[in-house]
Amino acid sequence: MLGTEPEVIQNYVETGQIKIVFWPVLNHGDPSVYATLTAQCVGLQDAEKFWDAHELLFTSQRDLWRADRDYFVNTAVSLGIDQATFEACYDDGSALDQVLQLDALRKERGIFSQPYFDIAGTLFGGAPSFTNFAAVVDPLLANAP
């Protein structure tokens, strides 16, 4: 989706037609749990930096298998996030509970892959080209309330 995302943002998000919402997909054990927790705690300090953390962690996936707490703290700090506030969030358990609850809700909805899209209640998955994305989304938006 990262390849299509800039066009989706320019053509749909910036025009107010759709909103991109992140839902955790914790299919890769601890690395996906703690990467998602990191993005969540970053986002609680600065909502826009959530997406910076998401992209940085996504593009650094190979590093996540060896990552420890210090790796995630350093990632957050590298984005300009206050270290003490981040560590409190990372360690206190409430953000982790929220991440795990969102993942459970995703599974309850029958979503087991990524990326996945919910457009006006219609679900579809895959990493489409922008042209294919628009072919699906435009009719749904035209019929949305």
Image: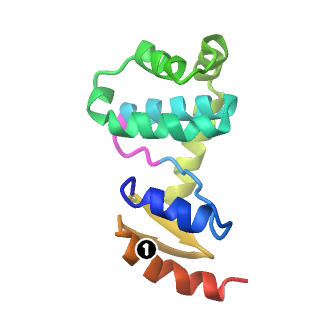
Residue 89 x/y as whole percent = 64, 22
Residue 44 x/y as whole percent = 68, 32
User: Start and end of the magenta stretch?
Assistant: 25-29
Residue 102 x/y as whole percent = 58, 48
Quadrant for the N terminus, please.
Answer: bottom left
- 21 left or right of 111? right
Front residue of this view, candidates 10 and 117: 10
- Tell me which secondary structure the magenta stretch mostly adopts: loop
- 86 left or right of 77? right
Give the vertical position of 68 relative to 97 (above or below): above
Please tell me in which quadrant of the rendered image residue 5 appears: bottom left
Give the vertical position of 106 relative to 31 (above or below): below
* Residue shown at the point (63%, 76%) measured from the top left: 120
Q: Label 1 sits on what residue type?
A: Phe
Give the vertical position of 22 relative to 92 (above or below): below
Disc 1 crowd rating (10 Å Cα; few below 14, some 14-19, many 20+) is some
Front residue of this view, candidates 52 and 40: 52
* Residue shown at the point (52%, 22%) measured from the top left: 76
- 40 left or right of 110? right
* Residue shown at the point (61%, 21%) measured from the top left: 81
- Tell me if residue 117 is in the magenta stretch: no
Residue 74 x/y as whole percent = 46, 15
Q: Which residue is mark 1?
A: 133
